[in-house]
Image: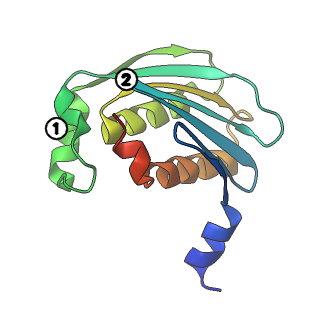
Amino acid sequence: MDFEQEKKAKNQVSQKTENIHQIIGENLELLVIVYSNGLFISLSQKEKAKLGTTAISLPLSPELGLSRAKRAKSSLKRDRQRLTSDIVLGSRNDSITKALAEKVTLATGKMVYLSTNLPREDESMIKEALQLVEEILETPELLEFQ
């Protein structure tokens, strides 16, 4: 099994319905609930699901909703300047929570309510959180919702 196949095997999608996507990683669990105007994302340790530090990210322009694959990398900086995420509640891992919420808003063009409950400054958990968010952003249904 090569590295990519092994990575996919570790991060099995355990539940997927029309509006709910769940990915369970090695140490973390990511749950996404899709609404018509945005997303609710919960990211926490496996079997210890609870709300934690929360970020709310809103796009300033509807143009942010362009397909992630269609945008050139040079336009990402311009799009990021039109993004706002000025509400973060909580102090543990507030920077990573804000960054993840902005990343999802940039990719989807929708409002994002993201809650993280991670150990303070655990680099391996933060890397896994980023990988899970990247994986969920590759889900076509998530980027194409109404």
Q: Which amino acid type is shown beneath numbered disc 1?
A: Arg
| Real-space Cα separation, disc 2 to disc 1, in angstroms | 23 Å
Single out the residue that lies furthest toward the bottom: 1
x, y percentage for residue 68?
A: 28, 50
Q: Residue at x 62, y 18 (%)?
A: 91
For the residues carrying marks 2 and 1, which lies nearer the camera in this image? 2
Mark 2 or mark 1: name the one nearer the start of the chain.
Answer: 2
Q: How many marks?
A: 2
x, y percentage for residue 16?
A: 60, 48
As drawn, the label of residue 116 is none
Question: Colour mode?
Answer: rainbow
Q: Which amino acid type is shown beneath numbered disc 2?
A: Asn
Task: Name the one closer to the observer, 45 or 40.
Answer: 40
Q: Is residue 83 above or below residue 71?
A: above
Q: Residue at x 34, y 38 (%)?
A: 108
Decide: few, some or many residues near mark 1? Use Cα within 10 Å; few <14, some 14-19, many ≥20: few
Q: Quarter of the image holding residue 61?
A: top left
Task: Name the one closer to the observer, 110 or 18.
Answer: 18
Helix, strand or loop at disc 1? helix
According to the picture, the residue beneath numbered tag 2 turns out to be: 37
Decide: few, some or many residues near mark 2? Use Cα within 10 Å; few <14, some 14-19, many ≥20: few
According to the picture, the residue beneath numbered tag 1 turns out to be: 78
Q: Is residue 25 above or below residue 47?
A: below
Q: Is residue 127 above or below residue 112?
A: below
Q: Is residue 36 above or below residue 31?
A: above
The C terminus - image quarter: top left
